[in-house]
């Protein structure tokens, strides 16, 4: 049976390659185990990938450097175990003398993980030992050999929580009352402390039938040091009144998107298809450029390759190639114009008499806006850039690798807001999993930081269509 924490862990090589920072944690980072037991075979396997020009190669070069630091320190002070900055002990396990039974391949890192766990279990209580992995293959092998499996990251920060609001406190909250940390502790003694920019959705027993709208959602503001009411759940321009949140998560997302970049420059939104991530991001960017003038442009960087690699064989120059990958933005922009432009303004001097003519007119509007207010850049050309006074959209971030995520997020300049979005259930990169991808990595590292808002949109909040919701429910 898997549990969240074990005293002794053998990390799978997939975990170390997916996130080498596991072996170089910050001092205040939570310990994942008392001792990491690492098969010595990993050192040779990592060196095999050292010259590979890929995200895996970058991670393996970082791992090789980290292994070197640990081994040098252990040689200098061989009497003392090596401890990471957060106190976790690191020990290497020699598996050469292990008897690899039928089904275990000496050349496989997964087999060496099993071997290391079997050897370690001879000197520690097996009930406190586990293999940490995101690989189904290694998990299956561990189950076959009756070895527990530890979750890579059991505490996924969603940026939101639901809390039952006592009726005696409800009147205070709905009359504009802020909740301080001290009051939060008094009102909700079983709840943990709030993180900066964390959202709280209040639920309570009320049979009045009253619709409280989004006033039942609060956000913990670090500057005010209190849980406050949402301020930005709608656009100020009346022409945008048709674009409004349809779910609680969309209200939270609009709050994040419309908050000025000086207060919240980073927004990370995770959710399945059809929950409105790209639509609301595009609408907020368009509003910020055309209506409020808060930004000079909308900067779109679609996922079309790896940082520093070739863009591929798609015909055209770099902009035309990138535009092919930016079609979701154009699709959403079309729907935004359909909702915000009065029907009579879509007509060419009143001559439109059929749907095809109206569509052509709308196409011209979309094309003009995309040319005038949007800038597109391939991910492969983003190195070294500084993007200021822009609303930056980085979509499909679940397929970026950890080093790419860091490089892309660091492009943000003064006056810019960066929106990172993706669906961790739709990863196509074979070297990534639900926790090692750039979206999850960024969210876990920026969780609870005052500069970032993190929102998770749930599957039950799909708004694209009833058919999309049915697909989410039945095609799993």
Image: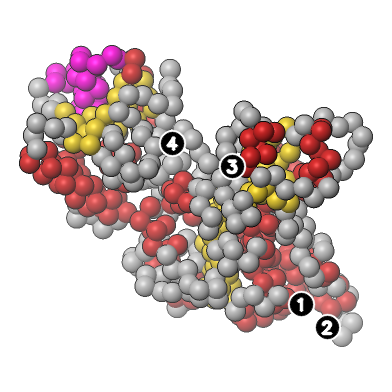
Report if residue 163 lies within the magenta region. no
Question: CA–CA distance between discs 4 and 1?
Answer: 50 Å
Residue 347 coordinates in the image, percent (x, y): 84, 79
* Residue bearing mark 1: 361
Label 4 or label 1, whichever lies nearer to me, is: 4
- Asked if residue 117 lies in the magenta stretch, the reply is yes
- The answer to the question of whether label 1 and label 2 lie on touching residues, with beta carbons closer than 8 A, is yes
Q: Name the residue tied to disc 4.
A: 153
Number of the label disc, if any, that sits on residue 79: none
What residue lies at 63% left-to-right and 66% top-to-bottom?
Answer: 260
The crowding category of the residue bearing disc 2, from other C-alpha atoms within 10 Å (few below 14, some 14 to 19, many at least 20), is few
Question: Which of pointers 1 and 3 indicates the residue nearer the eye?
Answer: 3
Examine the rendered structure and indicate whether residue 268 appears above or below residue 334. above
Label tally: 4
The quadrant where residue 223 appears: bottom right
Position of residue 361 in the picture relative to residue 117 (left or right): right
């Amino acid at each position: 049976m898997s549990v969240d924490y074990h005293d002794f862990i053998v990390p799978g090589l997939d975990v170390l390659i997916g996130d080498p920072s596991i072996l170089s944690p910050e001092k205040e980072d939570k310990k994942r185990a008392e001792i990491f037991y690492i098969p010595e075979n990993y050192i040779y396997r990592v060196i095999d990938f050292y010259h590979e020009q890929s995200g895996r190669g970058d991670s393996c070069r970082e791992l090789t450097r980290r292994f070197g630091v640990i081994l040098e320190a252990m040689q200098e002070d061989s009497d003392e175990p090596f401890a990471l900055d957060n106190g976790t002990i690191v020990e290497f396990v020699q598996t050469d003398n292990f008897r690899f039974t039928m089904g275990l391949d000496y050349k496989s890192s997964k087999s060496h993980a099993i071997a290391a766990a079997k050897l370690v279990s001879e000197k520690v209580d097996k009930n406190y030992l586990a293999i940490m992995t995101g690989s189904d293959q290694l998990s299956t092998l561990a189950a076959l050999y009756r070895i527990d499996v530890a979750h890579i990251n059991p505490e996924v920060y969603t940026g939101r929580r639901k809390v039952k609001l006592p009726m005696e406190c409800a009147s205070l909250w709905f009359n504009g009352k802020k909740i301080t940390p001290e009051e939060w502790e008094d009102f909700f003694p079983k709840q943990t402390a709030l993180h900066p920019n964390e959202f709280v959705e209040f639920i309570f027993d009320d049979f009045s039938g009253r619709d409280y709208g989004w006033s039942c959602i609060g956000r913990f503001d670090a500057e005010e040091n209190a849980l406050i009411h949402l301020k930005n759940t709608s656009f100020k321009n009346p022409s945008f009144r048709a674009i409004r949140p349809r779910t609680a998560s969309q209200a939270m997302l609009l709050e994040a998107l419309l908050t000025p970049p000086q207060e919240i420059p980073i927004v990370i939104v995770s959710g399945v298809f059809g929950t409105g991530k790209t639509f609301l991001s595009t609408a907020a960017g368009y509003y910020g450029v055309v209506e409020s003038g808060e930004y000079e442009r909308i900067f779109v960087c679609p996922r079309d390759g790896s940082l520093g690699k070739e863009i591929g064989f798609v015909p055209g120059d770099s902009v035309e190639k990138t535009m092919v990958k930016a079609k979701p933005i154009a699709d959403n922009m079309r729907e935004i114009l359909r909702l915000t432009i009065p029907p009579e303004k879509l007509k060419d001097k009143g001559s439109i008499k059929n749907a095809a003519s109206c569509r052509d007119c709308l196409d011209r509007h979309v094309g003009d806006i995309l040319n005038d207010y949007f800038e597109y850049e391939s991910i492969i050309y983003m190195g070294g850039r500084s993007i200021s006074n822009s609303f930056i959209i980085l979509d499909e971030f679940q397929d970026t690798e950890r080093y790419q995520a860091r490089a892309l997020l660091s492009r943000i300049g003064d006056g810019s807001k960066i929106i990172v979005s993706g669906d961790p259930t739709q990863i196509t990169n074979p070297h990534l999993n639900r926790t090692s991808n750039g979206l999850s990595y960024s969210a876990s590292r920026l969780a609870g930081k005052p500069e970032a808002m993190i929102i998770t949109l749930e599957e039950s909040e799909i708004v694209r269509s009833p058919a999309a919701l049915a697909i989410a429910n039945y095609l799993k």
